[in-house]
Every structure is written in structure tokens, then in C-alpha cells.
Amino acid sequence: MKIILVQHVSKLGNPGDILEVAPGYGRNFLIAKGFVREATRDVVVRVQAVKQKKSRKQEQVKKVRNELHNVLSGQVILIRASANEEGNLFGGIGPKEIVEAIEKRKKIQVDPKAVNLPHHLKTLGKHEVVLSLGGSDSITITINIARNE
């Protein structure tokens, strides 16, 4: 009996997988519990279309990650801010300001959620910032905060 998994089933597979199982196991357990659907021609075509769409989207995301990696890896981004004589900023530099500076200087869009900052940057000088691109992929950039003149 051909089935399509609707949800993850241990020792069988992940959603969208098409499998051949014993008819009794398929009807009496898997279909009864709602883990699978019977693999008719229409369902198989729909599942394959969804898988193709998902793989195209993953390819696009991978392409964007590679572009970000090539443009930003190891770069120094200058941000000007007001500071006192000791070098402490009057306001903090957060993810929003970092993303705006990247967009202004490098003409590339970055999601503010991708900026990993434990706290706002509050002093002049160079600071290492990690941008998470998803998965295990990340980029380290240097933020150079200089005094406004």
C-alpha cells in the first residue's frame, strides 16, 4: 500500500515522504491515527509540487546568504554618533542602527533580527558584531563608531 506521511513518524520518515507499507499497518494504524494519507495520483502530484516549491525557495535563500557573505564578510562599517569626552555615547547603537548603516554603505538589506548583540554598543571605537544568516551560517563584521563632528 502506498502512503504519504502527513507528519513525522519515527523509523518511517518525514512529512511528504511517499512509502510502501503493509496494507494492514497502513489502514489499521497509520491512517487511523492520522499520520498518513493514502497516496492517490492527485495527492502525489500535489506533494511533489510542494516539494519543488520548497526546494526553489531554499535555493533562493541560499543565494541570498551567499551574496550577503560575499559582500559583508570581514567588512568595517562606520557609524557616526554623539559622544562625551570620555568616549561614551549619549545613546546606544543597536541592531536597527547597524542595519541602517549597512544598507546605507553597502546597499544591501539585512534583517535586524540577524544582528547578534548582547547589549547596545555604548562606546566609541571598533566592535565585533556577528550577523546570523540562518542555520549555522554567520558573518563577523566590525562596527567602527566615530564621534559626530
Image (cartoon, rainbow, N blue to C red):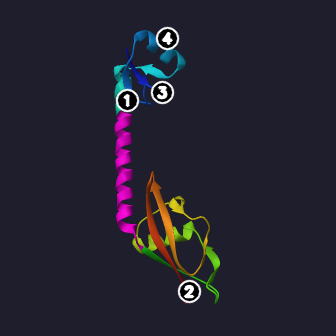
The residue drawn where x is 35% and y is 61% is 67
Image depth: mark 3 or mark 4 in front: 3
The residue drawn where x is 55% and y is 66% is 95
Q: Are marks 4 and 2 in contact (CB under 8 Å)?
A: no
Q: Nearer the viewer, residue 32 or 9?
A: 9
Q: Amino acid at mark 3?
A: Ser
**Gap in Å between the C-alphas at discs 4 and 2?**
73 Å
* 1 or 2: tag closer to the N-terminus: 1
Inspect the magenta stretch and tell me whether residue 57 lies in it: yes
Q: Is residue 143 above or below residue 140?
A: below
Q: Quadrant of residue 148?
A: bottom right
Image depth: mark 4 or mark 2 in front: 4
Q: Residues within 10 Å of mark 4 (few under 14, many from 20)?
A: few
Q: Is residue 58 above or below residue 41?
A: below
Helix, strand or loop at mark 2: loop
Residue 129 in percent (x, y) is at 50, 68
Find disc 3 in the rendering and name its residue: 10
Image depth: mark 4 or mark 1 in front: 4
**Gap in Å between the C-alphas at discs 1 and 3?**
24 Å
Q: Are marks 1 and 3 in contact (CB under 8 Å)?
A: no
Find disc 2 in the rendering and name its residue: 148
Find disc 4 in the rendering and name its residue: 28
Q: Start and end of the magenta stretch?
A: 49-75
**Gap in Å between the C-alphas at discs 4 and 1?**
25 Å
Find disc 1 in the rendering and name its residue: 46
Is 85 on the left-hand or right-hand side of 51?
right
Helix, strand or loop at mark 1: helix
The residue drawn where x is 52% and y is 21% is 34
**Gap in Å between the C-alphas at discs 3 and 4?**
17 Å
Q: Quadrant of the C terminus?
A: bottom right
